[in-house]
């Protein structure tokens, strides 16, 4: 008789543990849309609201994937595809131009569960470079493809192809012309097949600084406890000589491991490459026991500052903690989690 309550308690405990094993874990996601000299004084109310709407739409799409039990990788691809289609961001359509007037796109994706990764650099014909990075990861024996070879693989993998003029936007073009004239460099010919966009008269092109930025990145934790990270960019405006930034370099602009964290960075890529920023953040968490926020701040506010580099990052860990850190006046950013409220911010005085 005395044993019965214990037996009953045991049964309840067994049920509870089975329940918790079956209870879906939490999910969380963070998105950035680039960091830089993004200030209230150089932003009209319309522009600001366009950026906020774009980020909201994108992160909500990622949240929906995670809420229904989809993978972190699927969420990342869904979010980045939307931002690659949004001409306000420096990824896919709306990418910045090289000094010779081309759009050369870089992207990477990494799966924290398997440490598999895929990346592309300097691609010119794939509508969604993030999907090409994923195809490299899943359908090729390689991790990193560049230039014409990456374009050829894209076609072979059946990804949507577009004419390079698809990526053209008038305001990025005008921003390039301003920068080239400041630097005394020759102007390239307007790309073939491109006409003036009557919706964006040159006079309305705002501060060129804002238009140098807008790389996009996502980090996510799915209900199976897996982390992933992805980044997509046109790189830095007026880049030359086949320059490749940090975004597609695994460990620099993009990294994910279930053992520590997932990171996507943005900023002047040269510094992020030299500091292997994304991997360093995760190493500080994994080996030094720093919290995610401490690790992010250590890399951005100590190591990056020390090199006089500029930019920021978003990060997530297996518990669903999200951190962001940047040393620029602004970084477009948002976070969302199971049962939580969406938060979107731009300037450095916002939480
Ligand atoms: N990190 C990117 C690059 O250097 C640019 C950016 O994030 O703004 O290519």
Image (tube, rainbow, N blue to C red):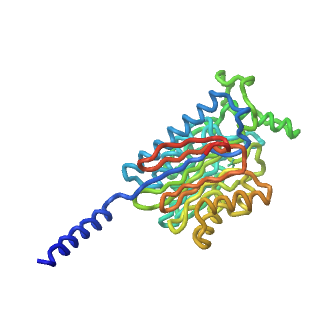
* Percent position of residue 266, x then y: 66, 51
Q: In the image, what residue occupies the spot 64% across and 52% down?
A: 148
Closest to the observer, 292 or 160: 292
* Percent position of residue 28, x then y: 47, 52
Q: In the image, what residue occupies the spot 56% across and 47% down?
A: 31
Q: Is residue 153 left or right of residue 311?
A: left
Q: Quadrant of residue 19?
A: bottom left
Picture mark count: 0
Name above or below for residue 287 compared with residue 160: below
Q: In the image, what residue occupies the spot 47% across and 42% down?
A: 60
Name above or below for residue 225 compared with residue 198: below
Closest to the observer, 271 or 344: 344
Q: Can you see residue 136?
A: no
Q: Is residue 139 left or right of residue 108?
A: left
> As drawn, which residue projects farthest toward the right?
184
Q: Can you see residue 334?
A: yes
Q: In the image, what residue occupies the spot 67% across and 58% down?
A: 297
> As drawn, which residue projects farthest toward the left?
1
* Percent position of residue 102, x then y: 71, 41
Quadrant of image for the N terminus? bottom left
Quadrant of image for the C terminus? top right
* Percent position of residue 131, x then y: 52, 50
Closest to the observer, 122 or 63: 63
Q: Is residue 236 left or right of residue 125?
A: right
């Amino acid at each position: 008789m005395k044993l019965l309550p214990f037996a009953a308690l045991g049964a309840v405990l067994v049920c509870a543990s089975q329940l918790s094993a079956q209870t879906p874990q939490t999910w969380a996601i963070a998105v950035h849309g680039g960091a830089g000299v993004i200030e209230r004084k150089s932003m009209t109310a319309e522009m600001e609201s366009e950026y906020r709407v774009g980020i909201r739409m994108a992160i909500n799409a990622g949240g929906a994937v995670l809420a229904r039990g989809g993978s972190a990788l699927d969420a990342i691809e869904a979010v980045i595809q939307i931002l690659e289609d949004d001409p306000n961001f420096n990824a896919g359509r709306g990418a910045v131009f090289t000094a010779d007037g081309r759009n050369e796109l870089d992207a990477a994706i990494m799966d924290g569960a398997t440490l598999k990764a895929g990346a592309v650099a300097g691609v010119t014909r794939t509508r969604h470079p993030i999907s090409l990075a994923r195809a490299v990861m899943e359908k090729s024996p390689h991790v990193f493809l560049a230039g014409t070879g990456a374009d050829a693989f894209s076609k072979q993998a059946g990804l949507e192809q577009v004419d390079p003029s698809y990526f053209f936007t008038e305001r990025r073009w005008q921003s390039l012309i301003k920068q080239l004239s400041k630097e005394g460099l020759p102007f390239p010919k307007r790309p073939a097949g491109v006409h003036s966009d009557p919706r964006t008269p040159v006079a309305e092109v705002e501060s060129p600084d804002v238009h140098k930025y807008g790389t996009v990145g996502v980090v996510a934790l799915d209900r199976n406890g897996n982390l992933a990270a992805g980044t997509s960019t046109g790189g830095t405006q007026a880049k030359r000589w086949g320059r490749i930034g940090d975004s597609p370099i695994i460990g620099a602009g993009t990294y994910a491991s279930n053992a520590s964290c997932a990171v996507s960075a943005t900023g002047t890529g040269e510094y992020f490459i030299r500091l292997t920023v994304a991997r360093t953040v995760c190493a500080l968490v994994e080996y030094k026991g720093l919290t995610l926020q401490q690790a992010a701040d250590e890399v951005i506010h100590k190591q990056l500052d020390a090199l006089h580099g500029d930019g920021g990052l978003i990060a997530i860990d297996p518990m669903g903690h999200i951190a962001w850190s940047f040393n620029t006046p602004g970084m477009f950013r948002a976070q969302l989690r199971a049962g939580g409220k969406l938060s979107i911010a731009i300037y450095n005085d916002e939480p």
